[in-house]
């Protein structure tokens, strides 16, 4: 491959210092780190432009992933938080008009949280910005290459063990 990036220079600089350095491992790890950092920065900018805090976005995302409606305990489980901790998040989102509390359809003693149109819109706008950038970056690969990359990263992720945080 003739295309070089700054990571190639990084690896070349470190090979004489660490002679047993595996350039493929170092290159892959540094590139994954740089890509993760880039996508995180895009997400942070999008959230700032949309006046959304990370925790608000995460809560909206968890709700959207449950079809727009869930019990607070389910949201807390998705976010790997204590159930009591979710109340303040929901309160803030209610004040912003992004969610509302409604009676549960399965247990009349329970109150569920539901996305409003405004909440769904805010979540979709943030998802759109991040998704567009993901597609732009991975658009450097052909569809079959993206599938191979995804499969390879799955194997590496499984070797790393359970994820330390939420996805």
Image (cartoon, helix red, strand yellow):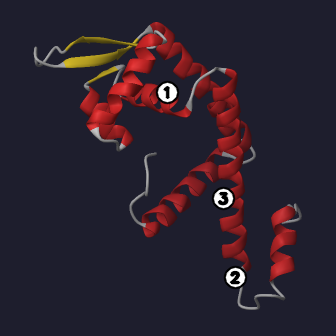
Q: Quick one: label 2, few (<14), some, or many (20+) residues within 10 Å?
A: few
Q: Nearer the viewer, mark 1 or mark 3?
A: 1
Q: Please say whether residue 63 is visible from this viewpoint.
A: no
Nearer the N terminus, badge 2 or badge 1? 2
CA separation in Å, label 2 and label 1: 41 Å
Q: x, y percentage for residue 22?
A: 69, 82
The residue at the point 71 percent across, 65 percent down is 30
- Secondary structure found at label 2: loop
* Residue located beneath label 3 in the image: 32
Q: Choose between 97 and 107: the one closer to the eye.
A: 97
> Which residue is at a point 25% across and 32% down the rendered structure image?
73
* Mark 1 vs 3: CB contact within 8 A: no
Residue 165 in picture, x, y percent from top left? 43, 51
Q: CA distance from mark 1 to mark 3?
A: 26 Å
Closer to viewer: mark 2 or mark 1 = 1
Per the rendering, the mark at residue 22 is 2
Residue 92, compared with residue 100, is above or below; it is: below
Image height of 105 relative to 161, above or below:
above
- Is 136 on the left-hand or right-hand side of 148? right
Task: Please rate how many residues cluster around mark 3, counting C-alpha atoms within 10 Å: few if below 14, some from 14 to 19, many from 20.
Answer: few
Q: Which mark is residue 56?
A: 1
């Amino acid at each position: 491959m003739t295309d070089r990036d700054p990571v190639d220079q990084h690896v070349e600089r470190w090979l004489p210092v660490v002679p047993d350095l595996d350039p493929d491992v170092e290159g892959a790890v540094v590139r994954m780190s740089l890509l993760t950092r880039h996508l995180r920065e895009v997400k942070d900018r999008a959230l700032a432009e949309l006046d959304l805090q990370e925790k608000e976005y995460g809560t909206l995302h968890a709700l959207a992933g449950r079809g727009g409606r869930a019990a607070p305990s389910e949201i807390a489980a998705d976010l790997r938080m204590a159930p009591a901790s979710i109340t303040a998040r929901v309160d803030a989102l209610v004040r912003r008009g992004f969610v509302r509390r409604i009676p549960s359809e399965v247990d009349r003693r329970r109150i569920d949280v539901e996305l409003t149109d405004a909440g769904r819109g805010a979540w979709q706008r943030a998802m759109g910005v991040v998704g567009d950038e993901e597609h732009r970056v991975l658009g450097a690969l052909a569809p079959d290459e993206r599938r191979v990359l995804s499969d390879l990263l799955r194997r590496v992720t499984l070797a790393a063990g359970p994820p330390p945080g939420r996805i």
